[in-house]
Amino acid sequence: MTVSYRTAITVVQFIFFVPSAVYATWLCFHYGLKAAGTWRFIATLSLLRVAGGISYFVSLSNPGLNVIVSVVVCELSGLAPLMLVCVALVGRVNKTAKVFPGKAAICISLLSLLGLILGIAGTDGALEEADTTDDIHLNSLTKAALALFLAGFALMLVGYFALVQDILRYPAKRAVLGTEARILVIVGLAAPFVFVRLLYSALGDFTGAELWSSIGGNDTVYLIMDVLMEIFAITIMYTTIYFAPLPKDAPAERIVDAESGDTNELAEQRTSSSLTAIELGSESQTALKEESHKNNEA
């Protein structure tokens, strides 16, 4: 049995994203769901890619409209967690640097989630309008979803460059961040791959050209601008485990602890000094009493 080019690409996705889903899920439980925002988004993306691959294999033996739409939904839905990984990493640095309000990261995340909702609603509408798989066309809701993803990515870059500029201007912040500052390098390396991935979807949605279609378009373009971009971006993001591991306490908390420690030391010094003065005072009084007692005896 001859394996098609597209099937081989799907196999490549399985080889990467199945272990990625398992590993990211383990990291979520290892670090705790509250502290593992990055990993739960990677786990979500990996599971969506596995589900999309399964849908594709099902479509080979049962090429129905619903199965094809499942592939499209999984393909589009993966953009949201990919964006949210970048937002989570940038927000993690900003928690200490405090360059922009924390609510800004929440707003960017909401844009991505709104884009995800619109994308699913648009795909569902395309399904209702189509009679066969060849009649599936992206509508205005799907285009609006992608526009929100692009806007979120642009805002993330604004926050990213603001952080970089602030840390370069104030070296003390870089010292306080410690290994957390490496996250900015990691995001800077992963961002171009995320951008190419978004560009591929934008070209497919806004031009309508079959070349950029993730379903019936050019397989080589799909492999390079979609599959490999996601694999490279996620691989780079995984390096935060080794180069910028989650600290037991945030740098800001370490500063507070250090300051409180210094205050305690000063308090102890003052207390010890006071005790010494009291002791010296009592010793002087004892000496004076003894001397006066001797003079009386004389």
Image: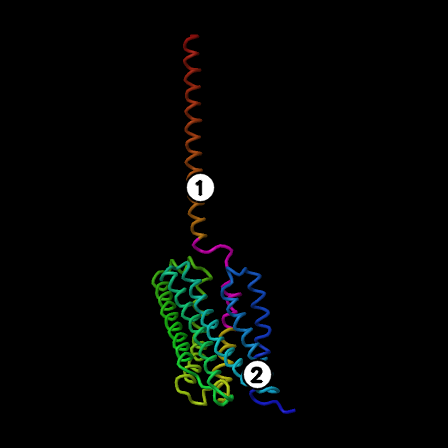
**Compared to 92, does 273 lie above or below?**
above
In the image, is residue 240 part of the stretch drawn in magenta?
A: yes
Name the residue at the bottom extreme.
Answer: 2
Looking at the rendered structure, the kind of residue marked 1 is Glu
Residue 14 horizontal side relative to residue 151, left or right: right
Which segment is the magenta one? Answer: 235-252
Task: Give the camera-side residue of 248 and 57.
Answer: 57
The span from disc 1 to disc 2 (Cα, nearest Å) is 66 Å
Please give the residue where the numbered disc 1 appears in the rendered image.
265
Q: Secondary structure at mark 2?
A: helix
Q: Residue at x 41, y 29 (%)?
A: 277
The three-letter code of the residue at mark 2 reads Tyr
Residue 132 screen position, x and y as percent: 51, 89
Quadrant of residue 162 in the image? bottom left
Percent across and percent down for residue 286 are 44, 19
233 or 116: nearer the viewer: 116
Residue 201 on the magenta segment: no
Mark 1 touches mark 2? (CB < 8 Å) = no
Q: Which residue lies at the image location 45% right of the left edge and 60% below the top edge? A: 178
Q: How many marks?
A: 2
Q: Is residue 202 left or right of residue 23?
A: left
Give the structural element (helix, strand or loop) at label 1: helix
The numbered mark at residue 56 is: 2
Protein image colouring: rainbow
Q: Mark 1 or mark 2: name the one nearer the start of the chain.
A: 2
Q: Mark 2: few, some, or many residues within 10 Å (few <14, many ≥20)? A: many
For discs 1 and 2, the disc positioned in front in the rendered view: 2
* Quadrant assignment for the N terminus: bottom right
